[in-house]
Image (cartoon, grey):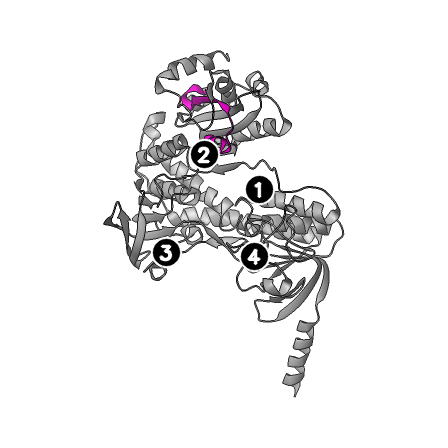
Amino acid sequence: MKENNASSKRQAEKSTPEDYDLVILGGGTGATIAAWTFASEGKRVAVIERKYVGGSCPNIACLPSKNVIHSAKIASYFRRSKEFGIARRLFAVDMTAVRDRKRRMVSFWNDAYLGNYKKTGAEFILGSGRFVGPKTLEVTLPEGKARQLHGASVIINIGTRAAMELLPGLAEAKPLTHIEALELDDVPKHLVVLGGGYIGLEFAQAMRRFGSKVTVIDRNARVMHREDDDVTEELQRILEAEGVKFELNARVRRVSGTSGQSVKVIIEQGGKEKTIGGSHLLVAAGRVPNTEGIGLELAGVKLTANGYIQVNERLATTAPEVWAIGEVAGSPQFTHVSVDDFRVVHDSITGGKRVTAGRLVPFCVFTDPELARVGLSEKEAKEKGVAYRLFKIPMEAVFRATTMAETRGFMKALVAADGDSILGFTAVGVGAGEVLGTVQVAMIAGLPYTALRDAILTHPTLVEGLIPLFLGQSEAVSAPQQAPETPSGARDSLRSQAAKVN
């Protein structure tokens, strides 16, 4: 009898929704900042997150991967020590120490995030959430109990996960995704990577530097195939010089074995089959949204044909007072975009006017050297029929790069053919992501390229390289003609242009 009463009580508690000003499903970066901000403004806010404090970025994605990549950079310096006048000694990579350094950083940020939840008054609920009605969610807590929450407004920020193609033998091989790759306690003997995008390339280079043999398989003719040809060629050349092997124009037909022991990937190239063998298999071939099984249909939230949440330019879904931010809303898959999505939703809820249309979105691929771009690429300019002037220099023309012996790559900029506005900037080079920020700010401010050309920038810094870039001769390109490459024989003249700075 007592047991039945207790069950009835739990059911009553479960069916009585708790009222909040804002309920957030998913605790990614944009959602976390939303929780802290709205709570600081006096709203009653709850965040439902099934596993990670702060979402994927500080736990299993952006920050942990860059932590591991930096360890790999140190390993590369050991291998190059003779180049810097330091006697080379034998060394070994301890992947458990690499992993533990990453874990300490993750723990630091988890504590910081929880501290900020406490400070702002936002409630963090660890559990699995799903919609049971309009703006109403049920949360299953780790101990099995359930709560129902109703929000005057609801934000959905449930992200994406690694895509897993329905290939024969792939699921049975239990391949790594980026999550498991960050938890390795041994260096893979031979890592086979499916996918030549930014995740695949970052891990390929890092694991090669730790001592793995690495083979990257991609179905396209180029890695990072959406970028300009000179960019993809330079990235591939850099990684091949470090020993990464590429199998391009390759279709995976089937997989056998088990990742972590022995795997075989059968690919087809030019009508012929070829077998790639390895010890570990990493899948890095795109992302899919986490929209299944969470009751979106009960909330009145519609999806796109690709399974993402359907939103307008204010990130409003098809359900009243329900918003979606980040990757699940089809936004560019970067944490900094998720943060700006929060700004859009904050304005939408509080009466502002911010929208997603017309945003200038930068990105950086953290290979070494980095690839960074903001604004138009040459491919995009030609597709849009935009005429431009092309400025381009090798990193050899940047003083700071030569002091660091980091002269791989180049910088280039697109400037309007009929004016001085900067249309786009791309760099493959050391510190490319940091240099990009200066150009982006100039673009946001509407400054002409001459403002950077004529600026007094600290010598010697990497950002100073923008001066020789914009001092150089430009090439006029009338879309859709092919943009000319900067000839390798022009490097001496580019150095001379750089010398004009001093």
Q: Amino acid at mark 1?
A: His
Task: State how far apart marks 1 and 4 are (Cα).
Answer: 23 Å
Indicate which disc, 1 or 4, sits on the residue closer to the N terminus: 4
Numbered range of the magenta stretch: 378-398
Task: Report the disc number at residue 336.
Answer: 1
Indicate which disc, 2 or 1, sits on the residue closer to the N terminus: 1
Q: Amino acid at mark 3?
A: Pro
Alpha-carbon neighbours of circle 1 within 10 Å: few (<14), some, or many (≥20)? Answer: some
Residue 387: percent from left, percent from top? 50, 25
SS state under label 1 = helix
Left or right of 378: which side holds 260?
A: left
Task: Report the disc number at residue 175.
Answer: 3
Q: Can residue 200 be spotted in the picture?
A: yes
> Dots 3 and 4: beta carbons under 8 Å?
no
Whether residue 257 is in magenta: the answer is no
Q: Amino acid at mark 4?
A: Leu
Instruction: Name the residue carrying label 4.
Output: 303
Alpha-carbon neighbours of circle 2 within 10 Å: few (<14), some, or many (≥20)? Answer: many
Alpha-carbon neighbours of circle 4 within 10 Å: few (<14), some, or many (≥20)? Answer: some
Task: State how far apart marks 1 and 3 are (Cα).
Answer: 29 Å
